[in-house]
């Protein structure tokens, strides 16, 4: 087996062994809400931060009041419950591929984990 094939095989085996993320219906923050069509970008209000779902370190949430937007991070990247998650650059909207890190409104952690956002799925109250 060539080294490249061995590496690909090992990576696929690791992905297969990784636990599946919790279903949205099991995420407490999304209870009673129905998912909409995922979007590449979401507009945000200045000063509001992302939060991590309590039961899923790989799911970032942004609550705009009417809608909770969920963005799944790569399986290799996640944050702990209660961590403050802020974008690398302040903007009025964020898109898939933009980076976020652990930090505060006052200070970015230059040595903290840096993760790319996924698509944003809107969750609105179920009718």
Image (tube, rainbow, N blue to C red):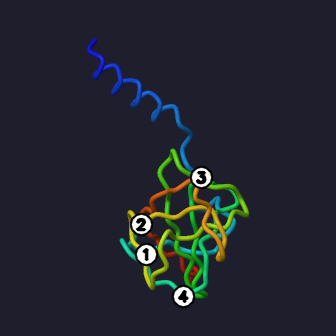
Question: Residue at horizontal 52%, vertical 68%?
Answer: 70
Q: Quadrant of residue 56?
A: bottom right
- Whether residues under marks 1 and 4 lie with C-beta atoms below 8 angstroms apart, the answer is no
How many labels, in total? 4
Q: Secondary structure at mark 3?
A: loop
Q: Secondary structure at mark 1?
A: strand
Q: CA distance from mark 1 to mark 4?
A: 11 Å
Question: Residue at horizontal 64%, vertical 76%?
Answer: 105
Residue 9 is left or right of residue 120, and the answer is left
Q: Position of residue 113 (x, y in %)?
A: 57, 53
Q: CA distance from mark 3 to mark 4?
A: 28 Å
Query: For residue 45, which numbered disc appears in the image?
Result: 4
Question: For mark 2, what is the residue?
Answer: 98
- Whether residues under marks 3 and 2 lie with C-beta atoms below 8 angstroms apart, the answer is no
Question: Does residue 86 sit above or below 46 in this rendering?
Answer: above
Q: Earlier in the sequence, mark 2 or mark 4?
A: 4
- Whether residues under marks 1 and 2 lie with C-beta atoms below 8 angstroms apart, the answer is yes
Q: Quadrant of residue 28?
A: bottom right
Give whichever of 103, 115 is nearer the camera. Answer: 103
Q: Earlier in the sequence, mark 3 or mark 2?
A: 3
Query: For residue 22, which numbered disc appears in the image?
Result: 3
Question: Does residue 64 sit above or below 34 in this rendering?
Answer: below
Q: Secondary structure at mark 2?
A: loop
Q: Position of residue 13 (x, y in %)?
A: 44, 27
Residues packed near mark 1 inside 10 Å, few (<14), some (14 to 19) or many (20 plus): many
- Whether residues under marks 2 and 4 lie with C-beta atoms below 8 angstroms apart, the answer is no
Which of labels 1 and 3 is toward the front? 1
Q: Quadrant of residue 91?
A: bottom left
Question: For mark 1, what is the residue?
Answer: 94
């Amino acid at each position: 087996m060539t080294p490249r094939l061995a590496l690909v095989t090992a990576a696929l085996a690791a992905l297969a062994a990784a636990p599946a993320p919790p279903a949205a219906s099991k995420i407490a923050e999304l209870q009673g809400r129905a998912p909409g069509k995922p979007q590449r970008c979401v507009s945000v209000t200045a000063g509001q931060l992302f939060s991590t779902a309590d039961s899923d370190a790989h799911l970032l949430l942004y609550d705009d009041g009417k809608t909770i937007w969920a963005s799944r991070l790569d399986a290799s990247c996640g944050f702990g419950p209660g961590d403050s998650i802020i974008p690398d650059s302040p903007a009025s909207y964020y898109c898939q591929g933009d980076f976020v890190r652990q930090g505060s409104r006052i200070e970015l952690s230059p040595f903290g984990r840096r993760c790319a956002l996924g698509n944003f799925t809107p969750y609105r109250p179920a009718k």
